[in-house]
Each structure stands twice: as C-alpha cells, then as structure tokens.
Amino acid sequence: MNLEFVGGILLGSLHAMVPITLSASGEVIGESAGLFNIGLEGIILVSAMTGALGAEAGGPAVGLMVGLGTGFVIGLIFGGVCTYLKGVQLIAGVGINLFAAGMVAFWLIHLGVPGHHAVAAENQLVNISTPYGAFSPMILVAIALPVFIYILLFRTKLGLKIRAVGENPQAADVAGIKIHLLRLLATAAGASLAGLAGAYLSIDWLGSVTKEISAGRGFIALATVVFSGLNPLLVLLGGFIFGFFDNLAVWVATMPAVQKVIPWQFIAMAPYAVTLLVVTGVIGRTKFPAAIGTPYQRE
C-alpha cells in the first residue's frame, strides 16, 4: 500500500480525533466530580461560532481563547444550575444543545450568508507542512491533555478530591472539601475543553462555521467517555478510533471511484455505528462514580 496514502489517512484521522479527544477529556474531569454534561454538542457548536468571531477580531490565538472561554462560561452556568440550584443534569444538558442549535442558526443568518460563515485564511491557525499534508499543532495538544489529566486525577491531591466528591460527597464534606465549588469548577474546566474543540473546528480543521459543524461529535465524545471508563489515557485511544472512522467517511465522500463500490452515505454512518457498537459492548462493564448525576444535599 502506498506510504503517502497511509500517511494521509493517518494524518486525517489525527485531525478528526482532536475535537472528540478534547471534549471527552474535559468530560472525564466533570464526571469524575459527579456531574455529567450531555450538552457537549451544544458547547462545541457555540464555541465554533464565537471562536471564529474571536479569530477575525484578534487572530487565531484569540479565537482559541474565546472558544475556551465560551465553554468555561457555559460550564459555569451548567455547574451552577446543577449544584447550587439542584437542577437535573440531563435536562440542563439538553437545554444547552437546544439553545446552541437555535442561537448559531440565528447568528449565521445575520452574518451575511445563511447557514455558512467562512473564516479567512489569515485568521486560521497556521499548520505545519508535512509530506502527507498539513499538521495542526492542536493534534499535539489533544495528545498531551489526556496524559496531563490522568496525572491530575490519579497522581495529585486535587485529583483525589475531585474523585472523592464524585464517589462519596458525604465523606468528602466531612473531610472539609467544598463539594459544590469543586464540582462547579471541575465541570467548567471540562466544558472549556469542549469549547476549545469547537474553536478548533472553525478556525483550524474546517475553516468555516455551519449550523451542523458539531455533526454529533459531542455525543461521540460522550461515548468515548463511556468507552474509557473515565480513564483519560483510554480517551486518547477511543478518540483516535472514532476519529479514524470520521475521517474515513470524509475521505470516501471525495473519492468517486470508491463511491462506485461503497455508497458514501453508508460510510458516513460508520462513526455513529461504531459508537453504538462500542457503547453496547462496554456499557455494562464501565464503573462510574457512585454519586454521579445526584445533587449533593447536606443532611
């Protein structure tokens, strides 16, 4: 098999891996603290829009920071509702997704071209040129972050506190840990990585914003979290697997010869079909924190 072809597929898979791995890594932090956020899809979508506008105002670095900040703010709102106000986490996450879908569609209408907003090349993140194509620096970030988060959760005192408030908040409260504050900050930090993933989509990998830009990647990230069992290192593996099939669908859609053998619509289902198969295989074996999804009420 042609080495250049294999290198191109691998590089494309790494690019497709980035938004899934970033979002899933952040969700591991939040779920370890006891909050699950199914609003990742909405956070990615909104942050893709705000990240693009930030890049157009101050350059790609500003765009990435705006996307990160957008995710953090949404995570703070979600965390505040679900901790201090005892909101239902499932409903709050659905609310984020619905809000994002409506807001981005409305925003795109007022940017000149309904449904699509292109980001100029000078406002996009500069990639590294390789014989197999452009290599985004965000790939290195996506690879390093799960390792960092693993060390944080399993090798530091802060990580022990995060896991304690997710597993046994009553005991953590007795030990003097501020349950609500730690959960709030953990879920906000996790959501900020989904925001970074959104900005990456619009100002790096795809170079534009559409109302479908998230394309289910937030839900695939949630499946990756299930696959990983809240182990950030397995998030990296899961992100690459799902990223490979995501990239495969894009590649087939651009190859007429392949489409004559396999319809591209069939291949386009691959990332979601693989997600369902993986989740079906591991859902009963994955152990989540005992207090996940349950608001803490001091007795």
Image (cartoon, rainbow, N blue to C red):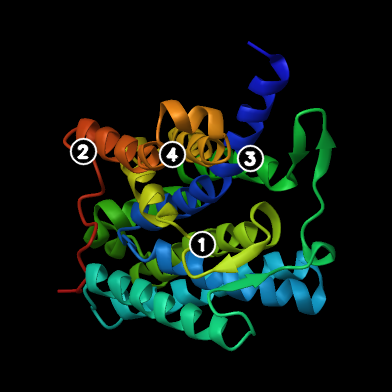
Q: Residues within 10 Å of mark 4 (few under 14, many from 20)?
A: many
The kind of secondary structure element at disc 1 is loop
- Answer left or right for 110 relative to 297: right
- Answer left or right for 264 relative to 164: right
- Find residue 76 and report its horizontal and vertical position in percent: 45, 76
Q: Residue at x 72, y 68 (%)?
A: 119
- In which quarter of the view is residue 215 placed? bottom left
100 is higher (above) or lower (below) than 152:
below
Tag 3 near tag 4, CB within 8 Å:
no
Q: Which one is earlier in the sequence, the residue at label 2 or at label 1?
A: 1
Q: From the image, state whether disc 2 or disc 1 is nearer to you.
A: 1
Q: Which mark is residue 264?
A: 4
242 is higher (above) or lower (below) than 170:
above
- Please name whichever residue, 213 or 258, is drawn nearer the observer in this view of the structure: 258
Residue that badge 3 annotates: 144
**Amino acid of disc 2:** Ile
Q: Quadrant of the C terminus?
A: bottom left
- In which quarter of the view is residue 263 placed? top left
- Answer left or right for 2 relative to 222: right
**Amino acid of disc 3:** Ala
**Amino acid of disc 4:** Trp
Residue that badge 1 annotates: 213
Q: Residue at x 48, y 70 (%)?
A: 211
